[in-house]
């Protein structure tokens, strides 16, 4: 597959049909007073029906921005999509005018946010907020929409749903609030659900329940699920494939079991080695020494080089593109093969 | 009051007292400030007005008592740019000399408010418990009385007359305004004392036996200085306007004091025929209030990182 | 919600007691002759002094006298002037006009203030935004009595678009000019508050959620953003209504609107201290009461406040 030039690396299409969602060479930058921050620099992936894609990476690596660009909800200005395509069932959403694009939001692609308390409108009852989906998109009557909202609240297992539909977001616990977000997101039976760190703000036990709920809903509805997370542990159980982001690019992409057994990128390796320390809830993957590059001024060569134990001379000048190492596995490292096979020693310093 | 003076909602906009605001007050803020046109304009106006207030003689060779009834209400001319008022006094000279009383009331009131509010807030925050409750509730009560209505009651209860010495008249107005204005500063100081008190390094200093006064001087003052400066600066503008309003109503300053409010009040009766009597002191007053508000605004913007 | 109302009512009691006590103490209990300046230019008639001393129990110790005074207030007895006029009745006569004027002013605040604020807030940094910022700053700086006098001079006397004074005929049309003058300051605040609040809320997470839900832009801004942004604005306007109900002493004085403010204005000129203090006491109480109502409205608008 000739992907080296552009960094495009669509996974082989098992079914041969048009993928549900196809992101191609997506680029986003933020034009701020302090300079232009290149937050997403050529991200590509595909998602099929019923598939779960986990997006992993440190804080600031561009996970949320990618998701926002897909949804079309970037803060703009300062954020701008400067290139690439987001195809939903073959239709490039980025090429659509605003109001046509809007029709896809909520109906075809939906999103759940990390902090449900701030993501829900504080001054409207939760039932009203869910019902709004039906009233606006389907022109349903107030009463019908409300009944549907209550049904949804029951589906996401909120006790006493009918009574609680009139309550406001701040009257719910964190886990219940996230369930309400989920109910709202799945209201119109979307094909793709993007969950941006849906459990980071929650207790460990509640985290597990929410993940279970998401997994169940995804199976029932055969949705494509993009799961953004810090937590490698969560991913292992639910994801089909994993994509590791760093500095706005994909560093490694692989089926979930392969990546755990044999990482093909030093960054992934570092992440995995830090697991014992991050199974504490909400902890950042900070066990790798050093900091990610400044996005307003990404140095030449490999972005990970300053923190990479295996860095060599070539890494300084040449940026490694995302290439297929073995079938189905992609890595953006000059020594991907060696790392994969455990056949490389840390460089002496 | 229905004709309120500006300080009313300043509080909500004042920047929170944090360590960063203090630090930026020194460097970044100043750096930002001197590039801001509003700061430059208001700063220049500020300097001019204060100079006029201190040495009015620099700006006019006449004295405010150089009046001649034969010139009564003559309009602007080359001899007298602003014209003459009903007593035949030069309006320009009166406008120049009026700055002193007005600015004096504004500044003294701000000082009074800072003293009362600062001490009350520090005491409330530092001692906490019942002291805090009493001071805070007291603040609520005074805060509940509209500035103008309250000052009106005070001043009506202590009427003066033409024989009252100038300084007494001015102090009365200052006191009336300060008594009603302090809760705002009290709240700011109190919350910054509370903040500082709970900070780790202060807890540590206390454990090591650092005294109360020292602690307050060292930590609380720098911590609350930024929002206090903003509120006080904007407040001066408000107090100047309040003084003028009270004088306009006839309960504030009394002649022979020369003030903008008094001049405007006198102009009321002749507005139709001699509008110059109104327009010049009114412009001076508005410009002066504008200068203080703009200055406070500019400082706040520079201090509040959120607004950058 | 019920508990919230009860709590707020309970909290108000000490404030009312404190406020009335302060006013009472200022008026009757301070050292010096409490009757100085209460009966016009001449000293009070001996009979009146004896009357009042009996009525206000001025010979009793302060706390006792105050409690009796509070009793009078609760019974709706706000005092009587030396001319035998009942303060309560005078107020009742003047109030409808003041309410009407306040409503006109509020209408200006809502239409112009919120309108300008929305325009500015939706396009931060645009020409309109800067225009709103600068013009509101200027308006805030010009004291109301200056705005009133100047507009009266030009719109009223020179160009005769509106009547210069209202007098006996407080028709809606006659109240437009004084209403606008009265609103001017708050209008500027409303515009700024709306702008800031809107600009802040546009970046809120829940607005992003609304977009992600696929709602049309109209609905995202008109319902989700606006509803939250207007909470502080509505609160401010409500509180301002309370202040306006307190009568616009200056505005009503300038335009001779026969309202409560004018009553106070005239009483000041005739040095009728009993009328002034009696009326002001009532107004402060009205102000507190409306503020309580505003708090309740606030609790209703923002469920986070009242649903604990
Ligand atoms: N509204 C914005 N304005 C300016 N820069 C932004 C904005 N949103 C994101 N960025 C930039 O984009 C970069 C990527 O942010 P993003 O939110 O995608 O990170 P993330 O991977 O989701 O991190 P986290 O795990 O903390 O959520 C950030 O470093 C930030 O500098
Ligand atoms: S390309 Fe070089 S620096 Fe980058 S990850 Fe691979 S080995 Fe490390
Ligand atoms: Mg994120």
Image: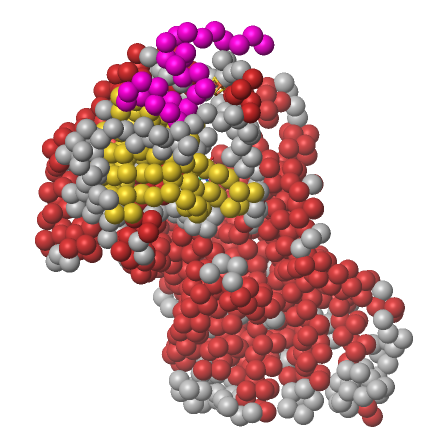
Q: Quadrant of residue A339?
A: top left
Residue depicted at x 46% and y 78%: C179
Work out which residue is located at the far front of the displayed protein and give it.
A2
Which residues make up the magenta segment?
A322-349
| B162 with respect to C265 (left or right) | right
Q: Quadrant of residue C111?
A: bottom left
On the rendering, which quadrant does ligand 1 occupy?
A: top left
| C129 with respect to B266 (left or right) | left
| C51 with respect to B202 (left or right) | left
Residue A336 sits inside the magenta stretch: yes
Residue C151 appears in view = yes
Residue C14 rendering spot, x and y as whole percentages: 42, 50
Q: Quadrant of the N terminus of chain A?
A: top left
Residue depicted at x 32% and y 56%: A98
Residue C252 rendering spot, x and y as whole percentages: 51, 79
Residue depicted at x 31% and y 18%: A326
Residue B88 sits inside the magenta stretch: no
Residue B74 in the image: above or below residue C96? below
Q: Nearer the viewer, residue A265 or B228?
A: A265
Work out which residue is located at the far right of the displayed protein and give it.
B61
Residue depicted at x 54% and y 40%: B191
């Amino acid at each position: 597959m000739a992907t080296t030039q552009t960094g495009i690396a669509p996974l082989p299409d098992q079914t041969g049909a048009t993928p549900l969602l196809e992101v191609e060479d997506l680029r986003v930058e933020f034009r701020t007073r302090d300079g232009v921050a290149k937050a997403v620099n050529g991200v590509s992936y595909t998602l099929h029906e019923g598939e779960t894609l986990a997006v992993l990476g440190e804080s600031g690596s561009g996970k949320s921005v990618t998701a926002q660009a897909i949804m079309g909800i970037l803060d703009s200005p300062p954020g701008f999509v400067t290139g690439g395509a987001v195809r939903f069932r073959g239709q490039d959403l980025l090429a659509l005018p605003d109001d046509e694009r809007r029709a896809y939001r909520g109906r075809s692609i939906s999103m759940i946010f990390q902090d449900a308390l701030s993501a829900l409108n504080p001054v409207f009852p939760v039932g009203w907020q869910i019902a709004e989906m039906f009233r606006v998109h389907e022109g349903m009557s107030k009463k019908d929409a409300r009944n549907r909202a209550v049904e949804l609240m029951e589906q996401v297992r909120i006790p006493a749903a009918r009574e609680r539909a009139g309550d406001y977001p701040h009257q719910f616990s964190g886990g219940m609030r996230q369930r309400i977000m989920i109910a709202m997101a799945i209201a119109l039976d979307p094909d793709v659900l993007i969950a941006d760190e849906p459990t980071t703000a929650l207790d460990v036990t509640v985290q597990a329940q929410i993940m279970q709920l998401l997994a169940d809903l995804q199976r029932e509805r055969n949705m494509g699920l993009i799961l953004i997370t810090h937590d490698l542990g969560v991913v292992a159980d639910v994801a089909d494939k994993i994509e590791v982001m760093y500095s706005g690019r994909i560093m490694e992409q692989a089926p979930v079991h392969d990546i755990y057994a044999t990482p093909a990128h030093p960054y992934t390796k570092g992440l995995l080695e830090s697991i014992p320390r991050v199974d504490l809830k909400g902890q950042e993957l900070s066990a790798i020494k050093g900091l990610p590059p400044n996005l307003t001024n990404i140095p030449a060569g490999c972005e990970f080089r300053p923190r990479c134990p295996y860095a060599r001379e070539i890494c300084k000048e040449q940026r490694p593109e995302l290439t297929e190492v073995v079938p189905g596995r992609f890595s953006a490292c000059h020594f991907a093969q060696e790392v994969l096979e455990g056949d490389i020693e840390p460089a002496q310093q | 009051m229905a004709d309120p003076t500006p300080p009313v909602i300043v509080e909500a906009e004042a920047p929170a007292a944090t360590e960063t605001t203090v630090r930026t007050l020194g460097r970044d803020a100043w750096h930002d400030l001197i590039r801001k046109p509003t700061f430059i304009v208001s700063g220049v106006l500020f300097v001019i007005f204060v100079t006029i207030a201190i040495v009015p003689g620099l700006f006019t060779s006449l004295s405010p008592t150089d009046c001649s009834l034969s010139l009564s209400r003559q309009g602007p001319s080359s001899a007298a740019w602003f014209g003459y008022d009903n007593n035949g006094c030069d309006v320009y000279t009166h406008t120049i000399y009026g700055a002193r009383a007005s600015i004096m009331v504004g500044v003294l009131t701000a000082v009074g408010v800072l003293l009362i509010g600062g001490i009350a807030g520090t005491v409330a925050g530092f001692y906490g418990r019942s002291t805090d409750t009493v001071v805070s509730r007291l603040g609520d009560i005074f805060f509940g009385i509209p500035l103008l209505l309250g000052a009106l009651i005070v001043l009506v209860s202590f009427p003066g007359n033409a024989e009252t010495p100038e300084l007494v008249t001015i102090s009365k107005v200052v006191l009336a305004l300060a008594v009603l204005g302090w809760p705002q500063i009290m709240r700011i100081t109190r919350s910054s004392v509370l903040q500082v008190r709970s900070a780790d390094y202060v807890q540590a200093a206390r454990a090591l036996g650092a005294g109360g006064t020292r602690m307050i001087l060292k930590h609380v003052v720098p911590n609350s200085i930024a929002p206090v400066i903003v509120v006080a600066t904007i407040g001066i503008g408000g107090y100047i306007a309040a003084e003028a309003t009270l004088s306009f109503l006839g309960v504030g300053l009394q002649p022979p004091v020369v003030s903008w409010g008094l001049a405007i009040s006198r102009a009321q009766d002749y507005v139709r025929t001699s509008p110059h009597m109104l327009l010049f002191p009114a412009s001076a007053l508005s410009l002066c209030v504008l200068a203080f508000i703009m200055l406070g605004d500019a400082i706040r913007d520079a201090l509040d990182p959120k607004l950058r | 919600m019920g508990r919230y109302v009860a709590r707020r009512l309970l909290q108000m009691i000490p404030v009312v007691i404190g406020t009335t006590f302060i006013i009472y103490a200022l008026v009757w209990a301070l050292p010096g002759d409490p009757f100085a300046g209460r009966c016009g230019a001449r000293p009070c008639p001996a009979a009146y002094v004896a009357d009042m001393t009996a009525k206000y129990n001025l010979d009793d110790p302060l706390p006792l006298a105050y409690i009796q005074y509070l009793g009078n207030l609760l019974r709706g007895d706000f005092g009587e002037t030396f001319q035998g006029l009942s303060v309560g009745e005078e107020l009742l006569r003047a109030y409808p006009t003041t309410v009407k004027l306040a409503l006109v002013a509020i209408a200006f605040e809502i239409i112009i203030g919120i309108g300008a604020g929305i325009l500015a807030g939706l396009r931060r940094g645009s020409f309109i935004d800067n225009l709103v910022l600068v013009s509101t700053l200027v308006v805030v700086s010009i004291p109301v009595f200056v705005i009133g006098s100047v507009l009266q001079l030009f719109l009223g006397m020179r160009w005769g678009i509106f009547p210069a004074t209202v007098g006996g005929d407080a028709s809606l049309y006659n109240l437009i000019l004084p209403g606008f003058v009265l609103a001017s300051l708050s209008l500027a605040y409303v515009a700024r508050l709306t702008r800031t609040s809107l600009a802040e809320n546009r970046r809120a997470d829940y607005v992003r959620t609304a977009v992600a839900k696929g709602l049309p832009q109209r609905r995202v801004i008109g319902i989700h953003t606006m509803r939250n942004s207007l909470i502080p604005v509505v609160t401010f306007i409500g509180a301002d209504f309370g202040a306006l109900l307190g009568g616009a002493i200056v505005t009503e004085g300038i335009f001779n609107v026969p309202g409560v403010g004018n009553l106070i204005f005239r009483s000041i000129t005739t040095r009728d201290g009993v009328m002034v203090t009696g009326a002001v006491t009532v107004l402060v109480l009205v102000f507190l009461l409306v503020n309580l109502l505003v708090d309740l409205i606030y609790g209703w608008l923002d469920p986070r406040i009242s649903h604990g």
